[in-house]
């Protein structure tokens, strides 16, 4: 359990981390949390379409967000005006069981663009399965093409965090952490670890500057272990030992967390 200073008001937990307030919306069940997050996403996308005629957002993979995507398909949105890109991806063929592309396509299938381009456009980061570096470069160009060659702005970012405090494919003690916070690149390859720790597979990830170009960033975490990990890691801004703490310290927009017990 969290044992350092925090306040709880109307199921919202807050605490201070290096001069910033960490805000966690707490729910008793993943079902309640999922409905809440789906509402946040659909509201942000609708607002973007109303304001700009289109919406662009990024989403994470893994098992935790899958029900959110499955719930989101019931939102009344003009899906033809929406583009979804990935926060990160394992460097595996998109039909593999370990592929987040496969999971997201299956969960969102009813609203994804068909052969007539009716539906939401989904952009996987796996643009070249033969070479990891080439894949990252091609994925970056795909994102640049969204905004006439400029880095896109995302209307919403759905993020996740692991119990080791990693987010996207930015893990503790990975060499990419030396550049991922300051690079001009939008997409970077992430090498696997050889000591048995994650990542066990090569990965592709958005850089921190790319993620920072989001109007709203919401992390979804579940279970007491991750909540405790967030509390501890938020007090540490070393990108090598505490990726999420480093991210919170530098992020230019407010970051929210949604947690389900």
Image: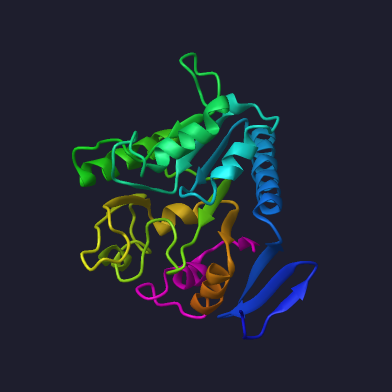
Residue at the (49%, 56%) spot, across then down: 212
Q: Is residue 174 left or right of residue 209?
A: left
Q: Is residue 197 visible?
A: yes
Locate residue 143: give its quadrant: top left
Q: State the image coordinates of residue 82 (x, y, percent, origin top left).
A: 56, 32
Residue at the (64%, 64%) spot, across then down: 261
Q: Is residue 68 above or below residue 242?
A: above
Q: Is residue 53 above or below residue 103?
A: above
Q: State the image coordinates of residue 118 (x, y, percent, origin top left).
A: 55, 18
Q: State the image coordinates of residue 231 (x, y, percent, origin top left).
A: 56, 76
* Residue sticking out furthest to the top: 116
* Residue sticking out furthest to the bottom: 4
Q: Is residue 156 left or right of residue 10?
A: left
What range of the chain is rendered magenta?
Answer: 235-261
Residue at the (66%, 66%) spot, across then down: 24
Locate residue 5: give its quadrant: bottom right
Q: Is residue 194 left or right of residue 258?
A: left
Q: State the image coordinates of residue 123 (x, y, percent, origin top left).
A: 42, 35
Q: Is residue 48 left or right of residue 109?
A: right
């Amino acid at each position: 359990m969290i044992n350092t200073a925090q306040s709880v008001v109307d199921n919202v937990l807050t605490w201070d981390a290096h001069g910033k307030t960490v805000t966690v919306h707490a729910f008793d069940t993943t079902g309640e949390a999922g409905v809440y997050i789906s509402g946040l996403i659909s509201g942000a996308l609708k607002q973007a379409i109303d304001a700009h005629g289109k919406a662009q957002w990024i989403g994470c993979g893994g098992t935790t967000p899958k029900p959110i995507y499955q719930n989101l398909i019931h939102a009344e949105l003009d899906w033809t005006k929406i583009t979804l890109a990935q926060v990160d991806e394992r460097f595996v063929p998109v039909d593999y069981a370990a592929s987040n592309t496969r999971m997201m396509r299956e969960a969102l299938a009813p609203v994804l663009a068909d052969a007539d381009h009716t539906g939401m456009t989904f952009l996987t980061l796996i643009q070249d399965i033969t070479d990891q570096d080439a894949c990252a470069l091609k994925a970056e160009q795909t994102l640049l093409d969204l905004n006439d060659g400029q880095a896109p702005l995302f209307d919403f970012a759905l993020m996740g965090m692991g119990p080791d405090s990693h987010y996207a494919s930015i893990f503790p003690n990975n060499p990419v952490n030396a550049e991922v916070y300051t690079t001009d690149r939008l997409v970077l390859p992430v090498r696997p670890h050889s000591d048995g720790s994650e990542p066990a597979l090569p990965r592709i990830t958005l850089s921190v500057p790319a993620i920072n170009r989001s109007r709203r960033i919401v992390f979804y975490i579940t279970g007491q272990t991750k909540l405790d990990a967030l509390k501890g890691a938020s007090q540490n801004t070393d990108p090598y030992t505490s990726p999420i703490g480093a991210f919170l310290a530098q992020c230019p927009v407010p970051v929210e967390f949604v947690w389900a017990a």
